[in-house]
Amino acid sequence: MPFPDFDPVLIHLGPIAIRWYALAYIAGILLGWRYVVGLVRNPSLWAKRGPATTPEKVDDLILWITLGIIVGGRLGHVIFYTPRIIWTDPVEILKTWHGGMSFHGGFLGVVIACAAFAYRNRIDPLRLGDIAAAATPIGLFFGRVANFINGELWGRPTTLPWGMVFPGAGDLPRHPSQLYEAALEGIVLFLVLRWATHGAKLLNRRGVVTGLFIAGYGVIRVLLETVREPDRYMPQFPFGLTMGIMLSAPMILAGLFLILRGLSEPIPTLETATPAAGDDEPR
């Protein structure tokens, strides 16, 4: 199956090129922001303890998360995948328009941003992480679709009928692993977290939704690394390991820890729960 003839640039506005990849980031951040505001404003999700924060604080948080995604994603790509440019061409680190973003780096950047925001605003960092985690698959979905449009991060060779011949990847049909990731990291993981927040009402338990996201992503990424082609410039790791597997496996353990911890922790009553930032009375 031939790869569709996508143009990575949606439109040129004079010297400015509007790229699908940039629009994917914008769409993921904006839709995730509105989704989190909806979670905070839904009283049925917080029956046993008040909301983690206020809609106004979520509006402030979005800037912190955006910086965490961009800075963390770029530095993560440099440190995990292309560390040589640190001493060969350090200016290239700043050229994000040349491509090169790492999910794991962006994840760590968001963790740091949320922790700093929580400390500054006296918000429980685990509860803040829960609402941020619930919206993250939205951005992952758009990002993986953009990877597909760009014809990058393709899969290993396959004989399956939906294998695609990607530009620059040789003549062999390959797994469209970007679409696998969009479906599993984006749609499936979102539905799991949607069940956790709206069905099981797990926002009342600190860190469980965060743990489900971290562990769920880790499992999905480890499995999909078996069909995703490693970057050509990466070394050959022993036992069939890839950088993606080595970075994702610890996420599974961390996620399971948060899930078990949150499920075993007593839920305070509304009278004793810690108030959201900016509130004078407990919720």
Image (cartoon, grey):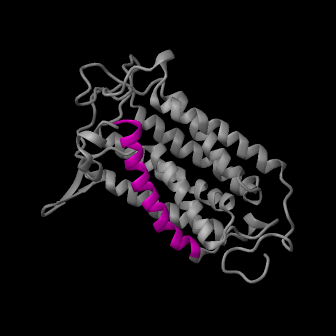
On screen, residue 101 versus residue 170, left or right, reads right
Vertical placement of residue 8 versus 224, above or below:
below
User: Residue 237 at x, y = what percent?
Assistant: 44, 20
Give percent across and percent down for residue 207.
70, 53
Q: In which quarter of the image is the N terminus?
A: top left
Q: Which residue lies furthest to the left in this view?
A: 14
Query: Residue 267 at x, y = what percent?
Result: 84, 59
User: Is residue 124 shown in magenta?
Assistant: no
Q: Residue at x 71, y 46 (%)?
A: 258
Q: Residue at x 48, y 28 (%)?
A: 225
Q: Please state which of residues 156 and 128 is positioned toward the viewer in this rendering.
A: 128
* Stretch in magenta: 57-82
Is residue 140 shown left or right of residue 153? right
- State the image coordinates of residue 94 (x, y, percent, origin top left): 28, 53
Q: Residue at the far bottom: name it.
A: 280
- Rendered position, 221 above or below 201: above
